Image: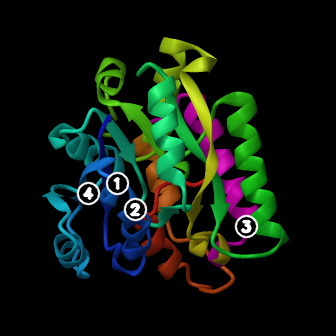
Amino acid sequence: MSMISVVIPTLNAAPHLAGPLCSLVEGMCQGLIKEVIVSDGGSDDGTSDIAEGVGARLVVGAAGRGAQLARGAAVARGAWLLFLHADTQLAPGWERVAERHMQESYERVAGVFRLRFDRPGLRPALVAMGANLRTALFKRPYGDQGLLIARRHYDDIGGFAPLPLFEDVDFIQRLVERGGRRALRGLPITAITAADRYEAEGYFRRVGRNAALRRAYRRGVPPTDLAERYYAPSPTRLDPYGKAAAHRARQDTLGP
């Protein structure tokens, strides 16, 4: 059986981290997961205590999603890597789907999960539907959907770049350029991600803002400039001064 190293980047992720860790228990019990690596960017909220309390391997370094993912992968020992956000948990049964994918992909096809938010309602359902449709048609998933990839293939692609923003877009672009559209496969089970930042800013406003930044990135605007715009405080429905939204944005990767 191929074994998976799970890499979870964190920054003050204590409120959400229990969910992803609990969703991995069955895979650990089945011997599918070799290790869980929490790559922390300097949390001061008890994230490291939670990680160490469940036996995860803790790697600490400078904050930055791309750099944290790369650091976690660098120390991983599994034949496969599963990158999972700290506010995203996998639905029950994911381990069977993952094992089947690893057996059938010949180590040259990466897998991503279907997105679902942890809130009911039409707006989260529509945003998730759009993300899943974009993944199916254009092979453009985001980190919220997880990424399962063979370690050897990950290294061949060049790993995650230490970008302050769009590290997931950059990696997937290189993956598809190398192997074509068949290099990425949607897996038939959901990754359930927290909707906090969408609830705070507004679902469609958030989608529009992300789309504008993505277009700027594809036009060649440096990720450092885009990160300043992305993390800048902006008024929200729940926080009119934008401070809470800015703090959450620094902890969360860019969603769909």
* 12 over 79 or under it: above or below: below
Q: Residue 30 has which mark?
A: 1
Q: Look at mark 2 in the image and give the residue it sits on.
A: 26
Secondary element under disc 1, as helix, strand or loop, is: loop
User: What are the residue bounds of the magenta stretch?
Assistant: 200-222
Q: Is residue 45 left or right of residue 21?
A: left
Secondary element under disc 2, as helix, strand or loop, is: helix
Q: Is residue 164 left or right of residue 183?
A: left
Secondary element under disc 3, as helix, strand or loop, is: helix
Question: Are the two marked residues, 2 and 4, in contact with CB atoms closer than 8 angstroms?
Answer: no
> How far is the residue under mark 3 from the one under mark 4?
26 Å
Amino acid marked by disc 2:
Glu
Label 4 neighbour load within 10 Å: few <14, some 14-19, many 20+: some
x and y percentages locating residue 189 in the rendered image: 62, 51
Amino acid marked by disc 4:
Ala
Question: Are the two marked residues, 1 and 2, in contact with CB atoms closer than 8 angstroms?
Answer: yes
x and y percentages locating residue 159 in the rendered image: 32, 30
Q: Is residue 242 left or right of residue 247?
A: right
Q: Mark 2 or mark 3: which comes first in sequence? A: 2
Residue 256 in sight in this render: no
Q: Look at mark 4 in the image and give the residue it sits on.
A: 63
> How far is the residue under mark 2 from the one under mark 4?
30 Å
How many labels, in total?
4
Question: Are the two marked residues, 2 and 3, in contact with CB atoms closer than 8 angstroms?
Answer: no
Q: Look at mark 3 in the image and give the residue it sits on.
A: 203
Label 3 neighbour load within 10 Å: few <14, some 14-19, many 20+: some
